[in-house]
Every structure is written in structure tokens, then in C-alpha cells.
Amino acid sequence: MMLAGPDRALRPAQALALAVPAALLGGAYIGQYVFGLYPCEMCWWQRYPHFAALALGLIALAAPHRRLWLGAAALALLVSGAIGAFHAGVEYGWWQGITPCASTAAAGGDPLDAIMNAPLVRCDQAPWTLAGISLAGFNFLISTAAGLAILGVLARTGARDHG
């Protein structure tokens, strides 16, 4: 559904609310299932707000009060960014994590065998970095920038609507 009338100004916010969580979740699942970068517990914590942001962005396509839904999507992205910042700090050794590790068991087959052979994924070790930035660090940077950009669009268009 294309935004019409005064809602056209919200297109950049709508695009960010849909594209950023979809891209980051897609990247996380590609990393997990294609490259074997299994998520730790804190990685999962970062994914949940992305699912929420994506759902809120989709709701904003059709529901009334688009600004409200897009604002909520922005807040969900900021929550994921905050969790990513905390997780990156744990990976870099800046502070102690809440949980040091988690394990992921494969679906199907013998449950005991799956548990015993599940990869142990530590939350305090970055499995991959680029230019010294971990995946959690990239999530912090991208999610926070997108959340703030959406709020900026909402603030700019709100000021235009009211004055």
C-alpha cells in the first residue's frame, strides 16, 4: 500500500521501519544457517525487537495513526540497538555479561544427542568482526541510526503538520 497525501512524508520512516529489521534479521539467519555463526543468548535478545519493529512497520502500512506505529517501530529498533551495545561491550571485555553462554540444539533426531552435540556459543566472544566491529556492534550502529532516523522523520513531519 503506497502512502498518499500527508502520509507521503512518512515514506522514508516507513521504508526504514520495514527494511532495516528485515535486512538485519535476514543477515542474522544467513550468518546462522549459511556460515555457521550460531547465536548466543544475547544475540537472540537482539532479534526479538527486530521482529517487533518489522511487525509494527507492517501494521503502519494499513492501520490508522501511522505515526504512532512508526514511532513504536523506531523504539523497538532502539531497544535492539541498546541490547547490541551491551552485548558488544561484553564481547570487547568492557563489562561483565548477564549470562556467559547459551547453547543451540538442532531440531529433530535424538533429543539427548542434539543437546550433547549442540554448539556452545559464548556471549563474551565475537564469532566474526569487520574492522574490529562485531555483529553486535554493527547491530548497535545500524539499529540505533535507523531508530533515530525514523524519529527524526516523525519529528520533522510532525512539526510541518502542526505549524
Image (cartoon, rainbow, N blue to C red):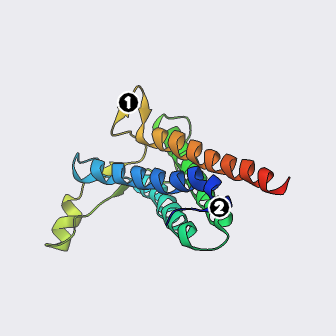
Q: Amino acid at mark 2?
A: Gly
- Work out whether residue 61 or residue 8 is closer to the camera in this orientation and state it: 8
Identify the element where label 2 is drawn: helix
Q: Based on the displayed image, in which of its 4 quarters is residue 134 positioned?
A: top left
Coordinates of residue 2 in the picture (x, y in percent): 51, 62
Q: Residue at x 56, y 46 (%)?
A: 146
- What's under tag 1, amino acid-wise? Leu
Label 2 environment density (alpha carbons within 10 Å; few <14, some 14–19, many ≥20): few
Query: Residue 93's spot in the image, x, y percent?
Result: 50, 35
Q: Position of residue 105 (x, y in %)?
A: 26, 64
Residue to which mark 1 is pinned: 130
Number of labelled discs? Answer: 2
Q: Secondary structure at mark 1?
A: strand
| Comes first in the chain, label 2 or label 1 | 2
Q: How far from the left and from the top, in percent, is residue 35? A: 23, 45
Residue that carries the numbered disc 2 in the rendered image? 5
Above or below for 123 versus 133: below
Between 64 and 33, the one nearer to me in the picture: 64
Q: Residue at x 59, y 52 (%)?
A: 13
